[in-house]
Amino acid sequence: MHVLRIRTNKSQEIIDITSQVEEAVKKSKVKEGLCCVYARHATCAIIVNENHDPSVCEDILDMLNKLIPEHAAYKHDKIDSNAHAHIKAAILGPGEVIPVKEGKLQLGKWQGIALAEFDGPREREVIVDIVP
């Protein structure tokens, strides 16, 4: 198991972590199996999506903000004003599983793995576990 520490810089952003996950797969020496990528937090998510055009990440954040605005009389906001972040993270989910073949992640040509931050800036822990 590998733990990635990712420092986010904005309240909401999507950070490509593909290269760090690929490095964890390489270090594991697993040739065939599954790579589980999991965020240990309730206000961020792990996604697999296009990592070539940065406007895709902007579009994802823009649409999530339209669907789930920052302040909308959420009950949880009475505690710490981040209900929107919990809802976005719950919809996208805390993790992804990517097949590993011949020691490489089996991502599509335009796919990458990203941490979606909704309550930053913070330091986030992402667990990468490669199962043979």
Image (cartoon, rainbow, N blue to C red):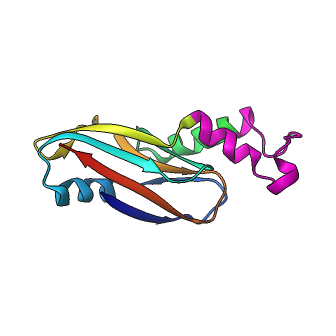
> Which image quarter: residue 52?
top left
Queried whether the magenta region covers residue 89, the answer comes back as yes
Q: Where is residue 121 in the image (x, y as percent from the top left)?
A: 63, 65
Please state the extent of the stretch shown in magenta in the rendering.
Answer: 65-91
The quarter of the rendered structure image containing the N terminus is bottom left
Q: Position of residue 84 (x, y in %)?
A: 74, 44
Query: Is residue 51 positioned above or below 1 on the image?
Result: above
The quarter of the rendered structure image containing the C terminus is top left
Left/right of residue 94 with respect to residue 10 in the rendered view? left
Judging depth in this view, the residue of 29 and 20 nearest the camera is 29
Judging depth in this view, the residue of 107 and 88 nearest the camera is 88
Q: Position of residue 53 (x, y in %)?
A: 44, 44
Query: Is residue 124 positioned above or below 132 on the image?
Result: below
Left/right of residue 113 with respect to residue 35 in the rendered view? right
Q: What residue sits 60% from the left and 42% below the top?
A: 89
| Total marks placed | 0
> Which image quarter: residue 131?
top left
